[in-house]
Amino acid sequence: MNRRDFTSSRKLDHLRICLDEPIESGNTGFEDIRLVHEALPDIDMDSLSLNTRFLGHELGSPLFISAMTGGHPETKEVNAVLAEIAGEFGLGIGVGSQRAAIENPDLADTFSIVREKAPDTFIVGNLGIVQLKDHGIDWAERAVEMIDADALAIHLNFLQESIQPEGDHDASGCFTALRELCRELKVPVIVKETGCGISYETGLRCYGAGAACMDIGGYGGSSWALIESHRSGSVAGKENLQLKGLGERFGIWGIPTAVSLFEIEKCNGPVIASGGIRSGIDLAKALVLGADLAGMALPLLKPACEGPKALREVISTIHQELRICMFLTGKSRISELPEARWYVTGNTRDMIEK
Amino acid sequence: MNRRDFTSSRKLDHLRICLDEPIESGNTGFEDIRLVHEALPDIDMDSLSLNTRFLGHELGSPLFISAMTGGHPETKEVNAVLAEIAGEFGLGIGVGSQRAAIENPDLADTFSIVREKAPDTFIVGNLGIVQLKDHGIDWAERAVEMIDADALAIHLNFLQESIQPEGDHDASGCFTALRELCRELKVPVIVKETGCGISYETGLRCYGAGAACMDIGGYGGSSWALIESHRSGSVAGKENLQLKGLGERFGIWGIPTAVSLFEIEKCNGPVIASGGIRSGIDLAKALVLGADLAGMALPLLKPACEGPKALREVISTIHQELRICMFLTGKSRISELPEARWYVTGNTRDMIEK
Amino acid sequence: MNRRDFTSSRKLDHLRICLDEPIESGNTGFEDIRLVHEALPDIDMDSLSLNTRFLGHELGSPLFISAMTGGHPETKEVNAVLAEIAGEFGLGIGVGSQRAAIENPDLADTFSIVREKAPDTFIVGNLGIVQLKDHGIDWAERAVEMIDADALAIHLNFLQESIQPEGDHDASGCFTALRELCRELKVPVIVKETGCGISYETGLRCYGAGAACMDIGGYGGSSWALIESHRSGSVAGKENLQLKGLGERFGIWGIPTAVSLFEIEKCNGPVIASGGIRSGIDLAKALVLGADLAGMALPLLKPACEGPKALREVISTIHQELRICMFLTGKSRISELPEARWYVTGNTRDMIEK
Amino acid sequence: MNRRDFTSSRKLDHLRICLDEPIESGNTGFEDIRLVHEALPDIDMDSLSLNTRFLGHELGSPLFISAMTGGHPETKEVNAVLAEIAGEFGLGIGVGSQRAAIENPDLADTFSIVREKAPDTFIVGNLGIVQLKDHGIDWAERAVEMIDADALAIHLNFLQESIQPEGDHDASGCFTALRELCRELKVPVIVKETGCGISYETGLRCYGAGAACMDIGGYGGSSWALIESHRSGSVAGKENLQLKGLGERFGIWGIPTAVSLFEIEKCNGPVIASGGIRSGIDLAKALVLGADLAGMALPLLKPACEGPKALREVISTIHQELRICMFLTGKSRISELPEARWYVTGNTRDMIEK
Ligand SMILES: Cc1cc2nc3c(=O)[nH]c(=O)nc-3n(C[C@H](O)[C@H](O)[C@H](O)COP(=O)(O)O)c2cc1C
Ligand SMILES: Cc1cc2nc3c(=O)[nH]c(=O)nc-3n(C[C@H](O)[C@H](O)[C@H](O)COP(=O)(O)O)c2cc1C
Ligand SMILES: Cc1cc2nc3c(=O)[nH]c(=O)nc-3n(C[C@H](O)[C@H](O)[C@H](O)COP(=O)(O)O)c2cc1C
Ligand SMILES: Cc1cc2nc3c(=O)[nH]c(=O)nc-3n(C[C@H](O)[C@H](O)[C@H](O)COP(=O)(O)O)c2cc1C
């Protein structure tokens, strides 16, 4: 199996593990946040609007389908379903890392199916920051072109890389590459974590470099430390045992999503909250805390594998929950949610106090 | 089954579920509150008085029997028992929503039995705010007349409505209707939640509109989200499955009673604390925190179904507990209770700190 | 059984329940307090002294044997053992309520045995405040004379009284009686709670009335609500069922010992910490927080029933623990303990913060 | 068995208990501390350096092998393995108390093997403060010479001593002895606790006396109270039963490592964090909080008994974890770690707040 096939098949391993194993870790902090009920909302729930604008695009709701897949022939169908439903609801959607398809153009259709199925939707391309550093703006442009992307997410996943012996351990130069990309690329650049959250300081730095948006990818949802730990389990050998242990121990690493959101919100830039968003109630809390969109990955994976009907139902329910939260906080528009009041208790309170 | 019968039979479903299923959710916050013991009270417990005044009426105690039933022939007996005992003890009592009997006057006696059995008692009528908006002051007046009510509670139950597909989802115009009612109605208007609590802001708004009193109906006791979730379980079909899920997930929604009370108390108007009051100790805590009365629903339902003797005993015990709390905080009159000192810990402390 | 026999036999019931049933409730707050370790104490543990002065008396240690028994022939032996060991160690000791022996002088020897066995010890008489009010200084003087008491504890137990239908429910006039007693009695008066603690305000009031000392009797140790609840269980009948329930529900009532101590300490008078002191470590914490003595009842009861050898061992161990705590906080004298530093966390922290 | 043999064989008891019994107690506080993730570190993990300087020595990493053994023939092999690996990685290493070998020079090789196997390593001698007081600088110099030590740790273990009837209970004069030692000894003196932590005040005092470093030995890891409690269990007799009980009850005594570190850090002197450090993540947290080195004992004992291969693997993993933490906080040098940001929650937060 050469490098290209490896990247591609690893993608499949990850999907399987995410579908079958307990790969969620810790708490997002949203469980410590409680929205203040508005007993007398004075609005009509059925006529409130989930529509929102994001980076100049109109979206059907602030629910964002986070980057998950593509890059292996068997993932094409999953992306097709995700895109079909994204199109139906007018949701923003991210594709998984496009590296495999840039390395091997035969796989491009596993990504471009998204644009095909959702011609008018806000689609976000995806590339790892190390690939960006190694291959420069050229790969970034190819990623954008491949799916006619409206924005490009550069994902940061250094926890995942660092626990793997063969991972990309060199982050030096990445920030410079990011700054150049922001300057050159025609579409907005989203800086995206994948389970460890983004701190205030890093947020400031990235916005300063020209990033259009932070996608928090905070702690409390899918954990790449746990995913890699499970993956290592399937192969024997000492190196894998060490990876298994590291994965388990670093399963507690990261900034809880609510805490990261609280910090990034102070940077005053566009922000997607993600990592452990598990219901429309979580989504509402994220918006109240200042997120523009809230992304979900894992909870959409299983229904997407089942087909459009299952996914449609899941998303309808999430929308309904969001609608109820808006109604019960008396907000008829997404843009009003940040005015809702909230309580914060426990550890999350401790973490967000100055 | 036409609309009118439906409203009526749904009432019966609710009663049955409340009697049989675990429909209480979360904590009121009173468990985080501890009254400061007065080791040397210098008063006589047996001569202290539970009497109190509320909205110009003399009451035998600050225990209020919260709105529960009426509207189906089989509920008449329950209301009769509640009223008999309310009369005996001089307690204020609310009837359940009178909508069914306004829609179908044949049912009026299931409510008017309350006045019959308790001619001199402070009786509170009950109507949903959506019915008020839809039918105006006319229905409100009919509700008052039906039982010769001393006050009318307008209940807010938008969580319950919002999770039901066929619920009343339109709250717009409700506040205006409330303001008009307060201006026109001959008896005082009580704004009443039903399990989610009332925030400071909403309290201010309602008092400003002329409401005579807030009945908190806070989180931590009977949960309509759970009640509806259970009800949906008894019928098959997809819509019901969604309701079941929504009910479960929104079982955590609401402002805990103690927190809501703490907020409403700052509005400086009359207030009934309710939602999860489960003993005379809870009742005392509510009064110490500033409530004028404290309402109980669920804990009185079962004894009321058993008959006057059972209910009398339950209420005697609650009164005895309240008396002990007064004695052990050195307060010989209900009006002195707010001077008692208290400790607050944990999440409730976090929620009431500025 | 006439009144006098009843008082006496009830004493025996209480003893039996305390020996056999789980009658301890809640937390004292000492579990939230941690003494700062002194790694380099620079003192000699074996030559440090547990001696202390209290109300003008020299005591062998700050461990006080709290009031427990007397008043029934079968309790004489227990008091004999307690007194013998108190004498041996030079401990202060309180006798149980002397009411029974004042009502029935035949029982006086069950108390006077204490003075007999411990001629030189600091002995504290005991009378309920209601008896004081009802019978005035006369009974108080008889109590003192009966055992040649060095001080008289007036116990406050209104929780216990209040939950019993036949209890003394009238506390009015008690404070006046206390003030008069303090003015007239030849020996110092100790105001003593029995499981619910004393607040800052009550402490101020009692010191102001001339009380020489507060004996905290705080929440978190033996609970008279639970004791009475158990006692009610042994007799059938409705009244008893109600007592059982009240006892259980009021098992949570009271000011935790550490919190009460923290408050009373601010009154700047002599103070005995008691209620839930369960080891020499608790004792040390109490002294660090400002207590002059720390009293224990329940943990000494069982060994006292076994005999002097068992009690001697228990007290030796407590002393050894206290000695270790002094050593490990670098304090060679009891009077230096309040200078030790401590951490406070959790609910107790919340309760003692202003 | 004479005194010298006793000291020596007791060493062996301790080792066996540490290998077989649960002798860890409580929490270090590190579980309440969370490092802020740096999503975009901009450094190369594989080229970051674990090297650090400590007391003028170059070390391969800030992991310190805490004092454990020597003094019985059977422990020589364990020390040989520890030293071999310390040499390989360039780690600082402490030997166990050298008292037995000073009392009986035949045992000297169980310590000197460390210098033999690790000729260039930073080796720390070890002597109890009571031995220092009793035998003066002479024993200290013999301890240093025995292993050509680069520094001498004077250990404080008064909890362990105090709970044992035959323990050294006299700490008076110890501080003076320490001050003299610091003035006279040619190598730097480290003041070292063994499980109870060092307070700010004691730290200030020791630095003031000329100590070069504090080795915290805080609460939350190996507990000598529990070790002695277990040891007492193996022998019958009353004295042992008392020791067993005291050991259990004092198993909760001490300043949690993170809290002690927080205090000592304010003294601004060199500091080794130890006591309950259980992974490279704990190690990183300790460095972030201001430690220069972090010591581990118990987790290295079992692998050291298995042999160099097992120990090498354990230490490699710890180093890898530390490297990952540095990478994920964006610090490429050990000296930069204190600049990393951290959250603190719960009890530890309460304990470090002013
Ligand atoms: C199966 C799967 C594949 C993923 N692949 C990518 C990816 O290729 N690129 C990326 O930026 N994030 C990827 N992610 C991370 C998600 O976009 C998201 O940040 C993270 O899972 C947290 O959200 P969740 O808790 O809702 O799953 C993936 C997540 C999952 C579950
Ligand atoms: C069986 C039942 C029926 C109720 N019906 C009404 C109603 O018709 N109108 C209303 O305002 N509240 C109604 N409530 C709500 C109660 O008045 C009260 O606000 C709520 O149950 C919280 O109190 P609890 O925890 O003591 O039950 C009902 C509650 C129960 C348990
Ligand atoms: C069996 C028993 C009898 C007691 N009798 C009296 C009494 O007669 N008078 C009194 O002031 N306190 C009495 N007390 C209360 C104790 O003096 C003490 O205040 C209380 O038990 C709390 O301490 P503890 O938790 O160590 O038991 C008694 C306690 C017990 C356990
Ligand atoms: C088996 C064993 C023997 C020890 N012997 C000594 C000793 O002789 N001198 C000393 O200063 N500390 C000694 N210690 C204490 C350790 O150096 C360390 O301070 C303590 O164990 C806390 O670290 P840990 O939780 O990582 O074990 C010993 C610890 C263990 C586990």
Image (cartoon, coloured by chain):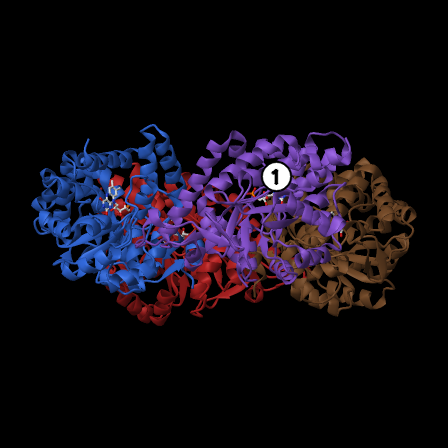
Chain colours: A purple, B blue, C red, D brown
Query: In the figure, residue C351 lies in which quadrant?
Result: bottom left
Q: C77 or B346, which lies in front?
A: B346
Q: C225 or D162, which lies in front?
A: C225
Q: Answer whether residue B182 is visible to the viewer in this image.
A: yes
What percent of the width, then of the height, locates residue C146?
34, 57
What percent of the width, then of the height, locates residue B6?
21, 35
Lateral position of residue A102 relative to residue D46, left or right: left
Mark 1 lies within 8 Å of ligand 1 (Cβ measured): no
Residue D168 against residue A307 in the figure, above or below: below
Q: B87 or D94, which lies in front?
A: B87
The kind of residue on which mark 1 rests is Ser
Lateral position of residue B161 relative to residue A277, left or right: left
Location of the N terminus of chain B (image quadrant): top left
Query: In the figure, residue B10 lies in which quadrant?
Result: top left
Q: Which residue is under mark 1?
A: A112
Residue A57 against residue D20 in the figure, above or below: below
Residue C230 against residue D94 in the figure, above or below: above
Q: Secondary structure at mark 1?
A: helix
Please rate how many residues cluster around mark 1, counting C-alpha atoms within 10 Å: few if below 14, some from 14 to 19, many from 20: many
What percent of the width, then of the height, locates residue A93?
55, 44
What percent of the width, then of the height, locates residue D95?
82, 50
Residue B41 against residue D160 in the figure, above or below: below
Q: C158 or D166, which lies in front?
A: C158
Q: Residue furthest top?
A: B236
Location of the C terminus of chain B (image quadrant): bottom left
Q: Quadrant of ligand 2?
A: top left
- Residue name at image x 50 percent, y 41 percent: A87
Q: Answer whether residue C70 is visible to the viewer in this image.
A: no
Disc 1 chain ID: A
- Residue name at image x 42 percent, y 62 percent: B353
